[in-house]
Image (cartoon, grey):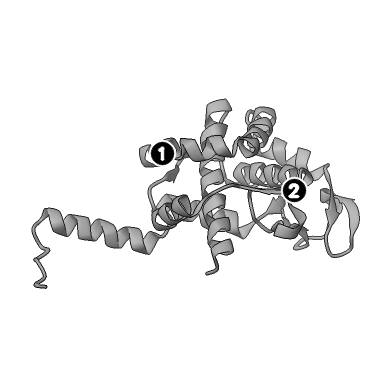
Amino acid sequence: MSIENTKGRIVNNLLLLYLIDKTNKEGNLEDNLKLQKLAFLSQKEFIERGLKGFSYNFFRWHKGPFSADVNNDLVLLKQMNFARWEDRIYLTEEGEALLNQCEVLFERNDAFLQIIDSIIKEYARFKPDEIKEKVYEMKVMVPKIRKSMLIREIPPKTLILYKPSKKRTRREFDINEGWLATLELIFDEEALELLKKAFGDAINGKIHAIAI
């Protein structure tokens, strides 16, 4: 995976954690339908302002904008015990701790958080179906046909919002090599499991000194 793709995946996960946490502080994140719409609205606003934050492809699906990658990231966050989905989607103590550890990084990227905050402030208290209906009435420029259409009128499975390209953005989420290396390890599930196992083995005295 290229550095650019790795960075995009890490930024997606960080911003998704922030969005989940902020939504529950302002209202209630009942389900994935609501999460999908909030991520879509945030990315739409990023793109309109020339910012590269979320990097998802959204398609017009049965209940409006949908990204399979948002689903995949939510599954990853659950598997890594950063998030839970029971009666609602929320962060675990580990997820909250990770956000706190990234406070300096978030401060450096406050422009992105302000946009998410404004979206959450407007929509956090709406029920999932209410947000769905509001999004249906929004217009987007459909990429392939270069035509502005109401989302409700766009044919199913049509790409309606794409990953922003570096050429078309004036500012990206700022994350240096040190943060990138640290967070790449944290969000790499396989590496994390190996670390946990190694740590457990060390505690149990299973690691032996290697002669050099």
Please name the amino acid that badge 1 sits on.
Gln
In this view, the residue farthest toward the right is 147
Quarter the C terminus occupies: bottom left
**Mark 1, secondary structure of its residue:** helix
Residue ID for mark 1: 101
Q: Residue at x 9, y 72 (%)?
A: 211
Residue 195 position within the rendered picture, expressed as x and y whole percent measured from the top left? 28, 59
Please name the amino acid that badge 2 sits on.
Ile
Q: Residues within 10 Å of mark 1 (few under 14, many from 20)?
A: few
Q: Residues within 10 Å of mark 2 (few under 14, many from 20)?
A: many
In this orientation, which residue lies closer to the viewer: 48 or 135?
48
Please, is residue 62 above or below residue 32 in the view? below
Residue 97 position within the rendered picture, expressed as x and y whole percent measured from the top left? 38, 37
Q: Residue at x 58, y 57 (%)?
A: 8
The mark that comes first in sequence, 1 or 2, is 2
In this view, the residue farthest toward the bottom is 212
Residue ID for mark 2: 47
Corner quadrant of residue 167? bottom right
Q: Residue at x 47, y 35 (%)?
A: 103
**Mark 2, secondary structure of its residue:** helix
